[in-house]
Image: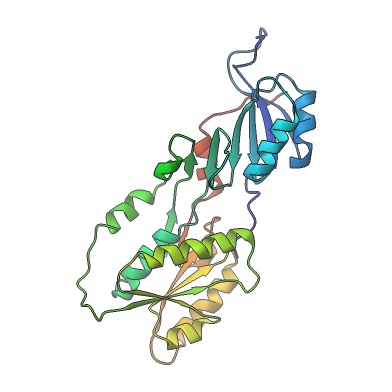
Amino acid sequence: MIPARGLLLLLACVWTGCAQPERTERDDGALRAVATCAPAELGATLRAHPEVTLVIAVDCGIEPALAAVADAGRDQSPFLIVVGARPAEGPMPDVCIEAPTGANAAIDMALLACQGAPTTLARYELGARTWTSANRAAGGATTAGPADAIFALLRNVRFPATATTVNKVALLASAQPTASQRTLADDVRAAASSRQNLELIESASVTAAVERGAGAILLTTSDPQITAAAKRAARNAADKSAAVIVLDPMLVAAHDTCRIGCPPAAVANALDFDPVRPR
């Protein structure tokens, strides 16, 4: 299962920097952390710290973060970055930073496996996606991770296929999914629906998926034990084996199989600044 993100640890981080009206002798234009707080306390924290010019809200959600900033009642709102949210229609903060689920990349790897290409034990690190009001219609912009170029090349590969060739890929989703798991499952379904000659099987077990002809299994887990059990079931299937591909934002090495995700470091890299913490 993919855990609810709190991967940057701080639920709401309030910073002040070079845009503050009055500069002090120690102010060299760098960002300085002045407070941290829970989402429900953000409005009060902003009122208590009028010098704040930048707010980074991690896993607070877009609407609650906007409401909290508005609740502060300031004449000039601070610059607001919401981490962990994908903007929909409607109001949005100055910047949203999203860790992509990796669904498209997982489908790419699954198709390769269905065509007979062996999967590796590689760690495929994706970059975070940054959204603003200017690029929302275009789907945001990616801060490229090490694996993004690889998947860009893979999407240009064309395999020989006939009209009757159907590649079967199985998605094993949690029976009681978290919000992030529901988003991931929806992304996998959308990615699969856009590919020709691909059938997405949603199965309760690896054995049942392989019996239905799946050539690749997509797991949404950060638990290597679940991965190990899935690999054993895939190897022991009656007719044939299937590749196991893990979607995991932590990219845990102990999965011992192909794993795809956007780790916390990639999300932090998209922020692109180095705050100076108070002494």
- Report the front residue among 213 and 125: 213
How is the protein colored in the picture? rainbow
Q: Is residue 101 above or below residue 116?
A: above
Q: Is residue 278 above or below residue 224?
A: above
x, y percent for residue 71: 75, 32
From the viewer's perspective, is 69 left or right of 104?
Answer: right
x, y percent for residue 173: 56, 71
How many numbered circles are shown? Answer: 0
Choose top left, top right, bottom left or bottom right for residue 45: top right
From the viewer's perspective, is 25 left or right of 72?
Answer: left
x, y percent for residue 239: 39, 91
From the viewer's perspective, is 38 left or right of 120?
Answer: right
From the viewer's perspective, is 220 left or right of 201?
Answer: right
Q: Is residue 140 visible?
A: no
Q: Residue furthest bottom?
A: 238
Choose top left, top right, bottom left or bottom right for residue 83: top right
Q: Residue furthest top?
A: 25
- Report the front residue among 94 and 272: 94
User: Split into 4 quadrants, where in the image is the C terminus?
Assistant: top right
User: Residue at 25% of width from left, 57% of height from top?
Assistant: 156
User: Split into 4 quadrants, where in the image is the N terminus?
Assistant: bottom right
Q: Is residue 37 visible?
A: yes
Q: Is residue 194 above or below residue 49?
A: below
x, y percent for residue 30: 59, 20
User: Residue at 75% of width from left, 28% of height from top?
Assistant: 72
Q: Is residue 174 above or below residue 247?
A: below
User: Residue at 26% of width from left, 79% of height from top?
Assistant: 165
